[in-house]
Image (cartoon, grey):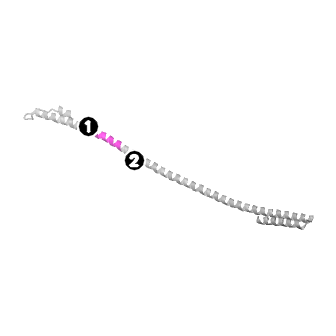
Amino acid sequence: MRITPLDIQQKQFPVKFRGFEMDEVYAFLELVREEMEELMRENSSLKETVSRLDNQLKDYKNMETSLKDTLMTAQQMVDDYKANARKEAELVLRESEIKAEEMLRDAQERVVKIHEDIVDLKGIRRHFKEELKRLIQNHLQLIEFDREREGEDEAARGGSDFIRNEAENEADDL
């Protein structure tokens, strides 16, 4: 059973012969009541403070949990960004390597094509020289044939030999 300050204040003691001094008993009971009221107020105040502090503690724990979650999420995001950046860098590097290989391959193909063109041009040049030489020889034969047919004299023939020798030398130089 709980005793309240009101119980103390309303408590009545029967009076008997050779009993306590009533005024002192009532004064003491009043003092006990006042002390008890003060203790109850203090107890109530402390309970409110404990409740308020418990709520603050819960709030702080919630904030701590939230901060931990936020930090973990931020760390995960940083890790993800790093991984993505690394992958992107690797992809760019691979693409650059592929482009470099393609450029090198194209350059090598162009070199091969240029060499083939040079060989073709040398063949065309050789063929042109041969054709020119054949043409000059044919013309010389025609001139010789015309000279013989017309019966040109020795002086004229000496001049045509000179022309023919010059034409043959030119053809050989080609």
Identify the main secondary structure in magenta. helix
Residue marked by disc 1: 45
Task: Say whether residue 54 is left or right of residue 10.
Answer: right
Q: Which residues are magenta?
A: 46-60
Amino acid type, mark 2: Lys
Residue marked by disc 2: 68
Q: Nearer the viewer, mark 2 or mark 1?
A: 2
What percent of the width, then of the height, locates residue 158? 86, 67
Q: Quadrant of the N terminus?
A: top left
What percent of the width, then of the height, locates residue 170? 78, 64
Q: Nearer the viewer, residue 158 or 9?
A: 158
What percent of the width, then of the height, locates residue 111? 66, 60
If you read the primary sequence from the N terminus, does the residue marked by circle 2 or circle 1 appear first? 1
> Outermost residue toward the front?
155
SS at badge 1: helix
Residue 104 shows in this picture: yes
Label 2 environment density (alpha carbons within 10 Å; few <14, some 14–19, many ≥20):
few
